[in-house]
Image (cartoon, grey):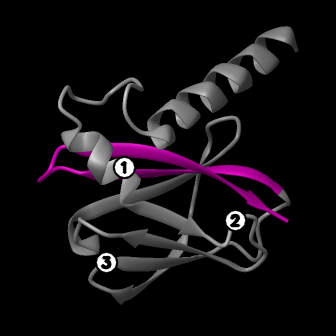
Amino acid sequence: MKILYSFILILTLAAGAFAQGPGGPGFEQGGVRSETAKAVHLYPNPTTEFVHVRLETLNIDHVKVSMHNIIGNELPIETEKIDDHELRIRVKDFDAGYYLLALRDEQSNFRGTYKFLKR
């Protein structure tokens, strides 16, 4: 049980480091990727039915999205493209708790993980 809690803590801290911007693991010198990370917005947070992902500088068509529960299991998701820079993900049927949203864009070499709360 101690190992599981340690894993969850490490996963949560790693996710927070990617979502927080400059200086975290995976960010290049000069702030190129950190500027992209700052241009990603998840709302509403906390949420009950949908979480919106707004990508100011990336095109949603090039971004791969995956969702994981707090212990790292990947979950199937229903997504809806709102426009070229916004995506809506249905979370209504998920259990209450924290989830991690992983975004990856091969064109810009951007990778980010963002945490949100489903109530």
Is the magenta region chiefly helix, strand or loop? strand
Residue pushed farthest bottom? 82
**Span shown in magenta:** 97-119
Residue 51 vertical placement versus 69 (above, below): below
The amino acid type of the residue labelled 1 equals Ala
Which residue is located at x 25 percent, y 46 percent?
A: 110
Q: Decide: few, some or many residues near mark 1? Use Cα within 10 Å; few <14, some 14-19, many ≥20.
A: many
Q: Decide: few, some or many residues near mark 3? Use Cα within 10 Å; few <14, some 14-19, many ≥20.
A: some
User: Any mark on residue 45, and which?
Assistant: 2
Left or right of residue 82, residue 43 in this image: right
The part of the image, by quadrant, that contains residue 71 is: top right
CB atoms of marks 2 and 3 within 8 Å: no
The amino acid type of the residue labelled 2 equals Asn
The reply to whether the magenta stretch includes residue 110 is: yes
Instruction: Give the mark nearer the N terminus: 3 vs 1.
Output: 1
Report the number of numbered marks: 3
Residue pushed farthest top? 2
Which residue is located at x 22 percent, y 29 percent?
A: 28
The residue that label 1 is drawn on is 37
Q: Decide: few, some or many residues near mark 2? Use Cα within 10 Å; few <14, some 14-19, many ≥20.
A: some
- Image location (x, y in percent) of residue 50: 65, 78
Which residue is located at x 51 percent, y 31 percent?
A: 17
Q: What element carries label 3?
A: loop
User: Any mark on residue 85, and which?
Assistant: 3
- Image location (x, y in percent) of residue 54: 42, 72
In-front residue for pair 72/19: 19
- Image location (x, y in percent) of residue 21: 41, 39
Left or right of residue 14, residue 83 in this image: left
Instruction: Check the picture and name the quadrant holding the N terminus.
Output: top right
In-front residue for pair 32/76: 32
Q: Is mark 2 on a helix, strand or loop?
A: loop
* Distance between the alpha carbons at the discs numbered 2 and 1: 17 Å
